[in-house]
Image (spheres, rainbow, N blue to C red):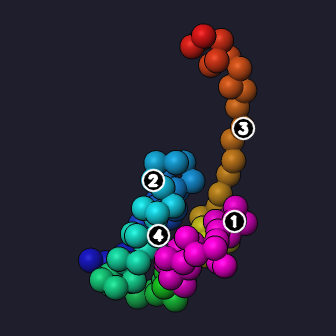
Amino acid sequence: MKITRKDVARKLADYLHHKITLDDLVDWAEEMMMEADFESHDFEALRDVVSRLGLADVKAFGMTWEDCEYFLSRLGYKARIEVTDGSAIAAVEG
């Protein structure tokens, strides 16, 4: 299985959007380190980011927002946060 920077960025985005858990992200990264073939022209960045994601559940390593920004930038992506007013949603649901 060939892994690209887009694959890794998508998986990290899924985690940041709470579509997958940290454990899911770590499991995926560990599996990719054992079984995947990293795209050659991004090999170093892919290997470094995926190996670090595989350690994100270890307390000594952890993973901060700044880490996520850095990983995405190494892959050629930029993270952006959108903050919305949830009170309108609460009023409709209530």
Query: Which residue shows up at 45% across the image and 53% down it?
Result: 20
Sequence-wise, the earlier of marks 4 and 3 is 4
Sequence-wise, the earlier of marks 1 and 2 is 2
Expressed as whole percent of the image width and height from the top left, the position of residue 67 reads: 68, 70
- Number of residues whose C-alpha sits closer than 10 Å to that of mark 3, classed few (under 14), some (14–19) or many (20 or more): few
The numbered mark at residue 80 is none
Distance between mark 1 and mark 4 Cα atoms:
14 Å
Residue picked out by circle 4 = 26
Expressed as whole percent of the image width and height from the top left, the position of residue 4 reads: 41, 74
Distance between mark 3 and mark 2 Cα atoms:
20 Å
Quadrant housing residue 11? bottom left
Distance between mark 4 and mark 3 Cα atoms:
27 Å
The outermost residue toward the front is 59
Residue picked out by circle 1 = 64
- Number of residues whose C-alpha sits closer than 10 Å to that of mark 1, classed few (under 14), some (14–19) or many (20 or more): few
What's the residue type where badge 1 is placed?
Thr
* Quadrant, the C terminus: top right
Q: Secondary structure at mark 3?
A: loop
> Which portion, as a residue range, is magenta?
48-69
Residue nearest the viewer, comparing 83 with 4:
83
Residue nearest the viewer, comparing 32 with 3:
32
The numbered mark at residue 83 is 3
